[in-house]
Amino acid sequence: MLDPGSKAGRIAATIRSRIVSGVYAPGSFLPAERVLAEDLGVARNTVRAALDSLARDGFVRHEGRRGTVVNSAFGGGADATFLLVSPAVEEHSPSLLTPEAMALIGNTLCACSGSNIQFHFQAMPPEGARELVRIVHGARLAGVLLVECSEPAVLEALHDEGIPHVVINQEQDMPGPATRVDFWQIGRHAAEFLLDLGHRRLGVLSGPSDRHLYGRMVAGFRDRLAEAGGSLRPEHVAHVKSCSEAARSAALQLLSRPDRPTAVFCTRDVRAYGAYLAARDLGLRVPEDLSLVGYDDITWPGEGRQFLTTFPEPARELGTSAIHMLISWIRTGIVPEDVIICPELVIRRSAAPCSEEGDADDGNR
């Protein structure tokens, strides 16, 4: 498996993104290795390693001297019916979906438009693994796509039964195969962006500390600050659930401090909205007095999300890549490698250069 942080891993991610977005159409030949190497600014052996990895995952196939062809993940062969499993929402009806789950499911279904793929939709059954296996065998389904699965017993049961399965957007520290977001890199990139704007007193409004994705984002953020000779003060970090009112309350305390942060990284956009409301309550302007950076581009309520600088959750690529992986497993019998994606920061109006005099010198030390 390619290290996603390696040069070949990044090139594979770039080519995969172009395939998923339709830049390289199914059935078409990719540009020659020499052309790709020049376009992407790397050596040909790096491109070759990236293409070999994509071939193993079923995105492309090598046709000797003719070149490399983009596979059509959704065509060619008998109809396929998959089980698409949505996560159960704590304290709510299993039919209720979070905005993130809706985005992932919607993009996965759209990716299959016009194909011969069909889905049997199912919320995670209360009986768990045993019932899920019964459904698959009873309906003779070809494989299973699970949205954000957090139950190890379910994955173990599917593995033990030899049922092809892929998790779409695995946010837990659990084995694959899965599509994943590189949360550590997101944290690093958020810190680097704010440091480049001159901010040194940085804060984080994160989720529960025991959730893997939030831990990884905060760890990446700390890592980049440490490289710059700074640190994240404990009093500048708050952990709250995904709720704008909880985030607002935590941000009021954070921003009322005499040494308040001049910029805050929020690990969900709904938390950024809570921080925005708190800043407004305190008479602080965003971005003049406080810069905000978020993650997901989904949970900021209403159209106002077009204001927020954020890392979009790459729902389309997460879903489409998962389908490629599942079909590759079914066709080849080989368990696919994880696909790890790091979205690019979308810069809007919620972050600006630091205007507080002296902030660039005192640091988070």
Image (cartoon, rainbow, N blue to C red):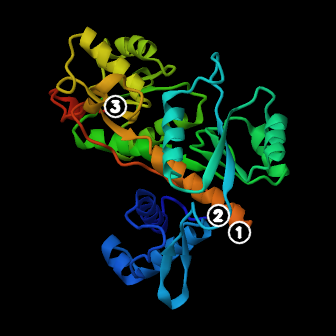
Quadrant for the N terminus in the image: bottom right
Q: Residues within 10 Å of mark 2 (few under 14, many from 20)?
A: many
Mark 1: secondary structure: helix
Please, what is the three-letter code of the amino acid marked with disc 1?
Answer: Thr
Report the Cα–Cα distance between label 2 and label 3.
48 Å
Give the residue at mark 3.
364
Please, what is the three-letter code of the amino acid marked with disc 2?
Answer: Ser
Please say if the residues under marks 2 and 3 sit with CB atoms less than 8 Å apart: no
Q: Does the rendering let one see residue 229?
A: no
Upstream in the sequence, badge 1 or badge 3? 1
Upstream in the sequence, badge 2 or badge 3? 2
Q: Nearer the viewer, mark 2 or mark 3?
A: 2
**Position in image of residue 230 (x %, y %):** 36, 38
Residue at the spot 19% in from the left edge and 32% down from the top edge: 354
**Position in image of residue 218 (x %, y %):** 47, 35
**Position in image of residue 310 (x %, y %):** 34, 37
In the image shown, does 8 or 137 lie closer to the viewer?
Answer: 137
Give the residue at mark 1.
332
Mark 3: secondary structure: loop
